[in-house]
Image: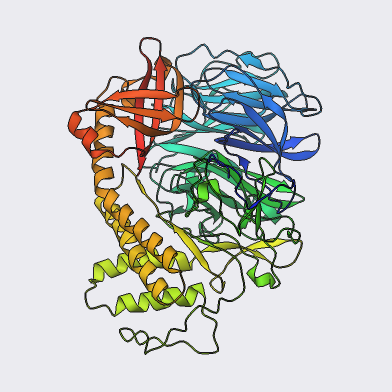
């Protein structure tokens, strides 16, 4: 399985084919944080950059990488990437400490990637935003940077066009290029809470700053609305605002719905209908009607619990697609026609030859899921973490049951995993005699499904005299997340769609229980997490009593819930203490300027050794392999060996590698 060390059990099928999964872009070994779309040699592609500092080109139709990665000087951080043209040829332009340009024509025809070309920035700090356009017949890049300036560069000869444009009072976080009254303009947004418009021919600001945001603005995009040029912006205040560029005023309502920082926006008009696409740290991509400001459909999510870093829009065969990169390093592709996911989780062929199998899209290994999978130590996996497990296709006589993995999308990242199969006779009918506390009776002609089972469980909770209203509401929220699962539903042997599947019938295999503590969470979120643990314990017993779960599965599921609820207080206390410890160091995030950092590493590290005055962390990538952190003895007593912690490390010339940030603790 991806992301986990494993060996083949007796159930391994040594065949190079099976359930063919179109993978997500990126992931382990090819992480994606920033994306943009364009055409190379006539085909739609996605270009990406990630923490390994390699720019990759992906075929949007097949989701496969084209050619080798594009290499250049390693930037301090991954901030900006844009698709542009130079003399009619496609190029990729990356902004970091400098600008790097790669020619894309013919990429992938040979094993040799294009050589990079550099435009030296020669100013303090990083380039945080870049966009491409044409000015007076010249191909240009426009940059926004840490030094608060907006600059224009000639892509052909690398020279600056005019002088740096000033006006922003803080870091410039976003740039877009458009044409207004036949003049090329740039629209920028920054940490001074403003959006600004620049006349690039004159090299100065056009009109007054566009104000209204109450927090830093991280994203901006441009487009046309009913024949007039507009810009859309979003940021830390969780809102989107639409601006009429000729008049310099906000139009339409402020768009609300996101619950986290809006990191990226795109403007598009599929079939002539103007829409806005936004990606946020609340894990979701949302689509908005640009005319009304209303959200279209449900948020696009895939169950992962790291924020969206970048969104881009493209057409594939004339139909709209959205590419969204998340904090895990994956880029998911969404079909806006059907408002559903493409790629990972979207099987391309019904695997009639190999019933009950899953194919690793990276290695081609095929696994028989009817037998146990074992790790390198010979232990069976009882719970499958969806972060390392892509959906699969299995053979069944009833196409309604061609479902293998169901994800529940909710604010806690709670998931249920279901195996396919015919209606299970062991599902005992829920009758009033069996459940006197709630009096729930099922129609004897109805099949008992996941949906009806969970409704019965909620009815029992509702009539439990020991249940307080507050606890019931929290358990109800956790339970309903299971009922709102989104799954991959096979309509026929050649295509699939993503649908809500409350009527799926099959055996419960298990539940993935969240065991993580976000150090920024408040007491209300902590209480919800505890409620999830309590709910899992009760649900395990309830399902086991009625034959929906085997005795062994019910016991294991209840133990998982109890352990999660038990670990939460210790993990929260220890994690926040670690966060304070690192925040007080001279190498903490708020104490370092970007220019002081010569390298960085972000990812999960496992606590492998606990001493009386230190903790040893082991990472999975290089650098580093091991880091030791001095801690008070009493803090070490609170921490469990094997806990995993998300960290950010930085390397400076004076001190080498140091802890810089700490985030989620996985217990």
Q: In this view, does 219 lie to the left or right of 111?
A: left
Placement of the C terminus among the 4 image quadrants? top left
Residue 94 appears in the rendering: yes
Percent coordinates x, y for residue 130 in the rendering? 57, 28
Residue at the left extreme? 634
Which colour assignment does the render follow? rainbow
Q: In this view, does 6 lie to the left or right of 352?
A: left
Percent coordinates x, y for residue 491 in the rendering? 70, 68
Percent coordinates x, y for residue 265 in the rendering? 54, 43
Residue 230 appears in the rendering: no
> Number of callouts in the render?
0
Q: Which residue is drawn at 57% across and 59% down?
A: 405
Residue nearer the viewer, 204 or 593? 593
Residue nearer the viewer, 477 or 352? 352
Q: Residue at x 51, y 29 (%)?
A: 79
Residue nearer the viewer, 259 or 328? 328
Q: Can you tell which quarter of the image residue 350 is in?
A: bottom right
Placement of the N terminus among the 4 image quadrants? top right
Q: Residue at x 60, y 48 (%)?
A: 9
Residue nearer the viewer, 200 or 394? 394
Q: Is residue 155 left or right of residue 475?
A: right
User: Is 16 rendered above or below residue 405?
Assistant: above
User: Is 476 rendered above or below residue 23?
Assistant: below
């Amino acid at each position: 399985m991806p992301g986990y060390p494993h060996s083949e059990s007796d159930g391994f099928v040594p065949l190079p084919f099976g359930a063919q999964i179109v993978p997500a872009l990126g992931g382990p070994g090819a992480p994606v944080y920033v994306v943009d779309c364009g055409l190379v040699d006539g085909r739609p592609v996605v270009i990406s950059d990630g923490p390994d500092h390699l720019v990759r080109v992906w075929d949007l139709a097949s989701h496969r990488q084209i050619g080798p990665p594009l290499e250049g000087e390693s930037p301090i951080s991954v901030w900006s990437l844009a698709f542009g043209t130079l003399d009619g040829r496609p190029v990729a332009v990356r902004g970091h400490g400098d600008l790097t340009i790669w020619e894309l024509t013919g990429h992938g025809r040979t094993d040799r990637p294009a050589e990079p070309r550099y435009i030296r920035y020669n100013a303090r700090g990083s380039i945080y935003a870049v966009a491409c356009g044409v000015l007076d017949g010249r191909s240009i890049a426009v940059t926004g940077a840490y030094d608060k300036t907006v600059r224009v560069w000639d892509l052909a000869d690398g020279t600056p066009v005019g002088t740096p444009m000033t006006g922003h009072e803080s870091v410039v976080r976003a740039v877009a290029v458009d044409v207004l009254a036949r003049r090329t303009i740039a629209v920028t947004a920054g940490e001074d809470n403003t959006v600004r418009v620049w006349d690039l021919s004159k090299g100065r600001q056009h009109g007054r700053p566009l104000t209204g945001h109450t927090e830093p603005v991280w994203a901006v995009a441009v487009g046309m609305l009913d024949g007039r040029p507009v810009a859309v912006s979003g940021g830390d205040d969780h809102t989107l605002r639409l601006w009429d560029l000729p008049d310099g005023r906000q139009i339409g309502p402020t768009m609300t719905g996101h619950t986290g920082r809006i990191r990226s926006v795109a403007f598009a008009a599929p079939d002539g209908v103007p829409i806005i696409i936004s990606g946020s740290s609340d894990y979701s991509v949302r689509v908005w009607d640009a005319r009304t400001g209303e959200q279209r459909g449900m948020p696009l999510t895939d169950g992962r619990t790291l924020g969206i870093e970048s969104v881009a829009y493209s057409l594939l065969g004339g139909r709209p697609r959205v590419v969204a990169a998340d904090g895990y390093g994956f880029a998911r592709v969404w079909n806006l026609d059907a408002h559903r996911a493409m790629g990972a989780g979207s099987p391309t062929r019904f695997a009639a030859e190999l019933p009950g199998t899953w194919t690793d899209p990276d290695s081609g290994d095929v696994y028989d899921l009817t037998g146990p999978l074992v790790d390198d130590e010979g232990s069976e996996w009882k719970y499958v973490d969806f972060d390392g497990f892509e959906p699969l296709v299995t053979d069944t006589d009833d196409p309604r049951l061609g479902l293998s993995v169901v994800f529940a999308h909710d604010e806690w990242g709670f998931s249920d995993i279901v195996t396919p199969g015919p209606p299970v006779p062991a599902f005992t009918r829920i009758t009033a005699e069996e459940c006197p506390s709630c009096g729930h009776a099922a129609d004897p002609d109805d099949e008992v499904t996941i949906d009806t089972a969970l409704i019965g469980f909620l009815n029992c909770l509702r009539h439990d005299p020991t249940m307080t209203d507050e606890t019931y509401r929290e358990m109800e929220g956790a339970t309903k997340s299971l009922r709102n699962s989104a799954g991959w539903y096979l309509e026929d042997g050649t295509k699939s769609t993503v649908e809500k599947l409350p009527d799926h019938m099959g055996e419960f295999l298990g539940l993935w229980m969240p065991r993580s503590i976000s150090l920024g969470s408040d007491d209300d979120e902590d209480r919800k997490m505890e409620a999830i643990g309590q709910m899992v314990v009760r649900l395990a017993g309830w399902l086991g009593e009625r034959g929906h779960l085997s005795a062994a599965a019910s016991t294991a599921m209840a133990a998982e819930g109890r352990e999660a609820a038990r670990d939460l207080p210790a993990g929260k206390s220890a994690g926040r203490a670690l966060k304070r410890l690192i925040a007080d160091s001279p190498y903490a995030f708020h104490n370092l300027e970007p220019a002081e950092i010569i390298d960085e590493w972000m990812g999960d590290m496992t606590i492998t050794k606990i001493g009386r005055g230190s903790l040893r962390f082991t990472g999975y990538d290089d650098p580093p392999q091991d880091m030791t952190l001095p801690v008070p003895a009493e803090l070490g007593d609170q921490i469990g060996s094997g806990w995993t912690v998300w960290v950010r490390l930085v390397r400076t010339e004076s001190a080498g590698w140091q802890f810089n940030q700490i985030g989620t603790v996985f217990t």
